[in-house]
Image (spheres, helix red, strand yellow):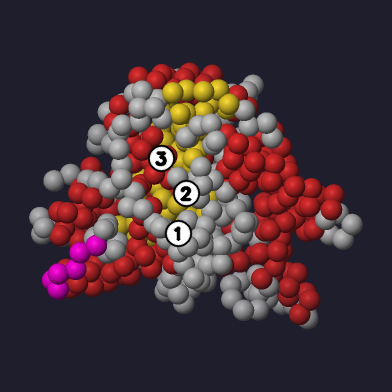
Amino acid sequence: MDIKKLTLEEIRNLIESRVIKVRDVTEFYLKRAKELQEKTNAFITLDEENILNQVENLEKELERGFKGKLTGVPIAIKDNICTKNIRTTCASKILYNFIPPYDATVVERLKKEGAIIFGKTNMDEFAMGSSNETSYFGPVKNPWDWDRIPGGSSGGSAVAISAIQAPASLGSDTGGSIRQPASLCGVIGMKPTYGRVSRYGLIAFGSSLDQIGPFARTTKDCALVLEVISGYDPKDSTSINRENPEYSKGLSKDIRGLKIGVPKEYFIDGVEEDIVVNIQKAIDTFKNLGAEIYEISLPHTKYGIAVYYLIATAEASSNLARYDGVKYGYRAQNVKDLKQMYIKTKKEGFGEEVKRRIMLGTFSLASGYYDAYYKKASKVRTLIKQDFMSAFEKVDVILCPTSPTTAFKIGEKSNDPIQMYLSDIFTINVNLAGVPAMSIPCGFDRKGLPIGMQIMGNYFEEQKILNTSYAYESAVGGFKFSPFQEE
């Protein structure tokens, strides 16, 4: 049996029917992850002893009749999501030795349904980056071309799926950090509605923007993980108390009459020609499936980058103030007093991109500048949100490219922060508005690199997005998610 081709549902069913063992699946992915780690650098921590202990405990539970939605499925976790007794670093020197005493709510929910918590994936430091080059533990590399970036900040979680080092993973998305790497690595990645998934145990970057979401190889796998991690959490003040659908059971290929909006602001100069061509082919596929296509406008799109980098950096400046070397994490040595210890700890513990964003955020919140920058950005954020609300009065979902380019070379943009920030131009506004969106594969450029298509939906309408993806995936005969797929 070829374990790497099994879906999450197949893994669960085969384990619960005793056709395969939890250990068989876990050891296959452990072997695979370790063999490819030198090439991909997808993981920061692979705690084999902890993983095998989970396997042993789950096998005992199975003997007692345990059944879950993800029984025996290894799930990789982005390294800014807390895992009890497993190192959680945010890919930063300042947290290089931090071991949380508790699990994030999403991790608790995965465990409750029988998942194996499988390794902590590499990322941009504190989720700040679009290329996974800012990690203290070195860059992650794209399996489609080892010289290229995988996207960020959840690059390790995307690569773990693309390189078949795990069957599913979790990432976090502040301005595209799930969708953009999903696009560049040729896998599925979803950012849920803000408030749909608990943020408790997610180490914060931008608190009003961050959301945890899944990476997967099929739409149904994505839907299954999403339904497990979603739901109200009283420990998270931003969590929304409303019904949590069983997305995997609600999937439908029938999208006849679905109204799809195509925003003219997302097809601009600078978008690679191959991306536009493949998106147009996808639009034709949707037409053949009976969907109705409408050109729409999201007029405040052009302000998204400026608004995001004011709000996100301001929130980051506030959130990262807690890393002072006193309570946990890295502490600078050879200091003469407390003030010097604070300064030296932050100087030595944070990387350049994190320090840049702290400085930008601190400036925009400073006395005399708050009204000119942060307050004004918050007002324009409301206009961006209203654009989406108006659009969803006319259409069911919105379709556009996920990224303006395919994966670029490692080091190509690392000395040009503005060009790097523009990598998220099509994903940022989703976070500012708080709406859900996902990226799915929709072809390749002439270099053979994956292209991603973004599907956006109205608040709490993840099911419509998933059904749109499911219909497309079925129509094209499934996704080629990995250069290793036919090994």
Residue placed most toward the observer, 392 or 285: 392
Residue found at x 42% / y 61%: 231
Would you place residue 98 above or below residue 359 in this image? below
Who comes first in sequence, dot 2 or dot 1? Answer: 1
The prevailing secondary structure element of the residues shown in magenta is loop
Disc 2 to disc 1, how far (Cα)? Answer: 9 Å
| Label pair 2/3, CB-CB below 8 angstroms | no
Does residue 206 appear to the left or right of 466 in the view shown?
A: right
Q: Where does label 2 land, which residue?
A: 460
Would you place residue 128 above or below residue 349 in this image? above
Q: Where does label 1 land, which residue?
A: 242
- x and y percentages locating residue 118 in the rendered image: 34, 60
Q: Which mark is residue 367?
A: none
Q: How many marks?
A: 3
Amino acid found under the numbered disc labelled 1 = Arg
Does residue 295 appear to the left or right of 230 in the view shown?
A: right
Residue found at x 18% / y 73%: 60
Amino acid found under the numbered disc labelled 3 = Lys
Residue found at x 84% / y 59%: 366
Q: Where does label 3 land, which residue?
A: 464
| Label pair 3/1, CB-CB below 8 angstroms | no
- x and y percentages locating residue 404 in the rendered image: 57, 29
Residue found at x 31% / y 31%: 254
Extent of the magenta region: 63-68
Q: Residues within 10 Å of mark 2 (few under 14, many from 20)?
A: many
Residue placed most toward the observer, 147 or 86: 86
- x and y percentages locating residue 20 in the rendered image: 13, 56
